[in-house]
Amino acid sequence: MPVREIEDIEELKGLVGEDVSTSDWVEVTQEMINKFADATLDHQWIHIDVERAKKESPFGGPIGHGYLTLSLFPHIMATAYTLKQKFKLGVNYGLNKLRFMSPVPAGARVRGHIKLLNVMEVKNDGYQIEWQVTVEIEGHDKPACVAQAVYRSYA
């Protein structure tokens, strides 16, 4: 999917309420899940014990951590759109809402659909940008995750 190019914050403001773009697909591999488990110290067997997960898990095999799906948001955003206007820095400000609606099986591909909810000015020459991010699992009816992600950019 081509990255949507947005010239500046004024053009972005004009997109409030719209579905802005869809990210590239990314495969959630077992190796990725294992590395995430190591990084977060969350080694629950439903994520990392492939054989046990195949036998005992209600999901039929290992699944990615919900927070692994969330950690893909920077990649999702970067492959969905680019804002040509340069800012000094950008930070994750948080989430207004977050739901993990379906588990992501190891080996599945996911992508994000992003909708712009709001753009507002904040102190120190900044902007708060609120997105709805829906993470789709290829071949599944229900999304893996739906979140309202909030970012701040400072000129």
Image (cartoon, rainbow, N blue to C red):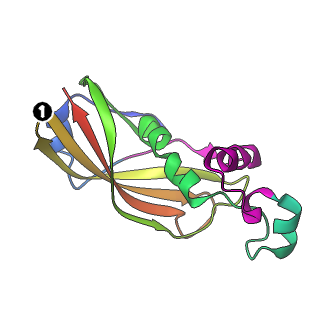
Relative horizontal placement of residue 51, taking residue 142 as reference (left or right): right
The residues colored magenta run 21-48
Q: Is residue 152 magenta?
A: no
Identified at 16% across, 35% down, the residue is 126
User: How crowded is the residue under tag 1: few (<14 C-alpha within 10 Å), some, or many (20+)?
Assistant: few
Q: Quadrant of residue 45?
A: bottom right
Identified at 10% across, 38% down, the residue is 123
Percent across and percent down for residue 90 are: 30, 33
Toward the front, the furthest residue is: 41
Residue on which the image places disc 1: 124
Q: Is residue 42 magenta?
A: yes
Relative horizontal placement of residue 54, taking residue 149 as reference (left or right): right
- Under mark 1, the amino acid is Asn
Relative horizontal placement of residue 143, taking residue 148 as reference (left or right): right
Relative horizontal placement of residue 56, taking residue 71 as reference (left or right): right
Identified at 72% across, 62% down, the residue is 44
Q: Quadrant of residue 77?
A: top left
Q: Secondary structure at mark 1?
A: loop
* Residue 79 sits above or below residue 84 on the image: below
Percent across and percent down for residue 18 are: 26, 53
